[in-house]
Image (cartoon, rainbow, N blue to C red):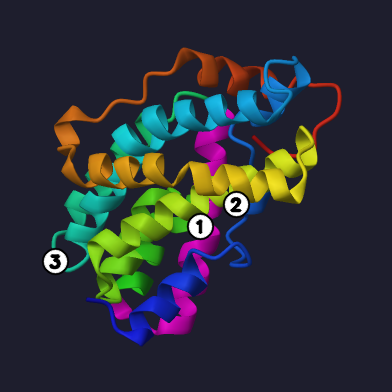
Amino acid sequence: MMNDKQLFYLMQIAGGTFPSGGFSQSWGLETYVANGKVSDEASFKRFMETYLESTVAKCEGPVMCQAYRLATDGDNRKIEELEDLSRAVKVTKEGRESSLRMGKAFMRIMADITDDEKLTEIKDMCGPEGITYPVIYGLVCGRLGLDIGESMKAFVFSTVNALVQSAVKLVPLGNKQAQRILLELHPLMEATVEAGMETPLEDISNFCPGLDIAGILHEYLTTRLYMS
């Protein structure tokens, strides 16, 4: 079971106010809203279901969990190999660059405020380009000794919450609708956590052409509020 200190850590690093830049990403949602495919509560929920099942449960979740397991491993080559994989499965340029920006910001802050020598070592190893967000999130949770299951839950919830808040602005949705969506997505979030923890790294998949196309088209939108 988690102690209070662990819970506070998770609430801090996975909270929407942590300056990792997640609030500036829509991961293709803005394109779907612009072309009219997401226009109300029901269509947004379908988007969320697709995103969680294709991207988080089968890809980012397993990568995060593997990074957690490598947090106390002395072989940095394994971390580099995992990072290469994490970048490779990000098909679109915008999605890959966004994950790197978030990861770089997260790593810089956590290396500085924790004074963890391993995180500082990883920061120096990655250089100016940075590191993808799922990898550094898992490494930080592992270094802090947080429970892997609770870390995964916070990772999934923060992803969902950020996208719901983006939908409030883009669709738009009301605050009551947003909270209802979060509540109704609880079972899917639980399933996403289980899949992320149980899927071996060799079985990860990020196959969702619709989301990839939305990511490619995003930079050509007439107006944009988000970076992806």
Q: Is residue 162 magenta?
A: no
Callout 2: SS: helix
Left or right side of 78 for 190? right
At label 3, which amino acid type do we have?
Gly
Q: Residue at x 48, y 72 (%)?
A: 11
Picture quadrant of residue 206: top left
- Viewer-nearest of labels 2 and 1? 2
Q: Residue at x 31, y 50 (%)?
A: 64
The reply to whether discs 1 and 3 touch (Cβ–Cβ < 8 Å) is no
Residue 45 or 33: which is nearer the viewer? 45
At label 2, which amino acid type do we have?
Gly
Give coordinates of residue 74: x percent, y percent. Answer: 14, 66
Residue bearing mark 2: 22
The reply to whether discs 2 and 1 touch (Cβ–Cβ < 8 Å) is no
Q: Residue at x 33, y 55 (%)?
A: 152
Give coordinates of residue 19: x percent, y percent. Answer: 62, 65
Of the image marks 1 and 3, the number of the one nearer the N terminus: 3
Task: Decide whether the magenta segment is chiefly helix, strand or loop.
Answer: helix
Callout 1: SS: helix
Of the image marks 2 and 3, the number of the one nearer the N terminus: 2
Give the Cα separation between the discs numbered 1 and 3. Answer: 21 Å
- Viewer-nearest of labels 2 and 3? 2
Mark drawn on residue 73: none
Mark drawn on residue 74: 3
Left or right side of 41 for 3? left
Mark 3 Cα shell of 10 Å, populated few (<14), some (14-19), many (≥20): few
Report the quarter where the C terminus lies.
top right
Q: Residue at x 43, y 18 (%)?
A: 208
Give coordinates of residue 226: x percent, y percent. Answer: 73, 39
Give coordinates of residue 45: x percent, y percent. Answer: 57, 31
Residue bearing mark 1: 104
Question: Is 53 situated above or below 221?
Answer: below
